[in-house]
Amino acid sequence: MFDYTIAEKQTSKYIKKDSDKSVFKKVSIFYLLTYILLPQYFGFEVAGFDLSLQRIGMLLVLFYVLESTVRTKSMFLIIKESSILPVLLLYFFVLIYTMIFRKNINTFMYTFIEFLCFFSLIYLFRNGLSLNEFVSSITVIAYVFGIQGLIEYITRKSLFSYLETIQGLYTGGMIRSGAYRVMGPSNHSLGYGLVLITIIPLICINYEEDKIDILKNKPLLIILMLNVFLTGSRSTLAVFLLEIGLLFLFSDLAKKKRALLGIFAFVFFLAIFVVLTYKTGFSRYIMLQITSVIDEIFKTHFAINFGADITTLSNSSDYRKVLPEVFKLPWLNPLIGRGSSYSLNAYISGHYIRSVDNFYVAQYIRFAYPGLVTYILIMLFVAFRMIKYAIKFKSGIVLGIFIGIVCYYVNLWWLDTLQTIKYVYILFAVYFAFFDIKLKIGGRSEV
């Protein structure tokens, strides 16, 4: 059994048992719900600043921390002793000189706030919520996302859109090839796909046994799988299949057999359902997504039989193929980026580029090679720590989280983050709050 209290044991000499522990637990749950569940367009506009409920939740946590000298020291200690800090400071150095050179404070502040949230989550997990409580919360949130997605497909409107109180962020419903694409609490269906990619591994883990178990939450997994299809995103579907494949690969033999039977059963019944309801819009939509991925890989044209707009799909694919040529543009400074507010407008190989659907290309535009390289160093550092932990302690939990992180960043080859980077930082925070600390203290609890 995993020792969920190890982080608290490590920091207990700096933190007193506060009499208002229950208050902080409520604040923690509120923060977690606002951070994960609520859309960014739900909040208030104050003097031209968007004060979303997510930011209000973060401010509550920070006010709670700063209100006490003991808690402030504890938060400072978490940041100071974090194993990720040296490489993170290197990245911040690039952001700061880019901010100064481009005279744009947001170039630094956006990322600073993201990592402030990251460290706030670590503090929250070590002192407010246990891993069990986090898992319970994320399971409930995943059910909300999944069921809402099915309702959204039927009504063709996200229920989260009724929470729009900050104008200009919600883009409205999305339709491609005549089919509605669910978007959940995100501003784009592609962004919702990224959210699903980070959540799915968390529900495919047996936390009591510390092992990957794809069928741990069968009904929820099926609901989220349907949501993946309904995003209408070829990259999301392809990365989801990769994710399931990796989770299956790293399951133990007994769970592999169960998972294999479950996957065969799902595919069989899905095939029967599609055949029996072949002429319905839902079945044709499922086939549209599957054949679109097949067409993209094998250069076939099966999707046209299910209503695909081949011209639109081809333009989308061709446009993404030329994006790496941005690295060759002579007028982009390879050492000093254009900053986070810069919008690229250029003709490249006959394509007009005005949005950059590739995180790594976009990172180069914003922060040049120093920013791109240092961020990749952050990714590699976290990956190395997690692999080291997973091997040393034979942890299925860490391995599952690692797969979620890897698949998220793989998906970013075809997308920018679309304001979803916070979701992968949740996975970072779970690892650094509950697991990484064991590598530092050299201890080992029963797993």
Image (cartoon, rainbow, N blue to C red):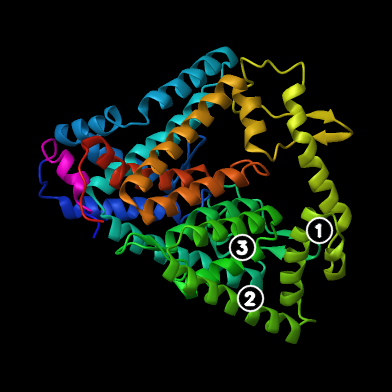
Residue 228 is marked as 3
- Marks 1 and 3 sit apart, C-alpha to C-alpha, by 18 Å
> In front of the other: label 2 or label 3?
2
219 relative to 237 in the view: left or right: left
Q: Position of residue 342 (x, y in %)?
A: 66, 26
Instruction: Specify which label sits upstream in the sequence, 1 or 3.
Output: 3
Specify the segment rendered in magenta: 4-15
Q: Give the quarter of the image for residue 310.
A: bottom right
Instruction: Specify which label sits upstream in the sequence, 2 or 3.
Output: 3
Instruction: Specify which label sits upstream in the sequence, 1 or 2.
Output: 2
Residue at figure coordinates x 58%, y 55% from the top left: 192
In the rendered view of the protein, which quadrant contains the C terminus? bottom left
Residue 267 is marked as 2
> Three-letter amino acid code at disc 3?
Val
> Vertical placement of 344 versus 57: above or below?
above
Residue closer to the observer: 418 or 253: 253
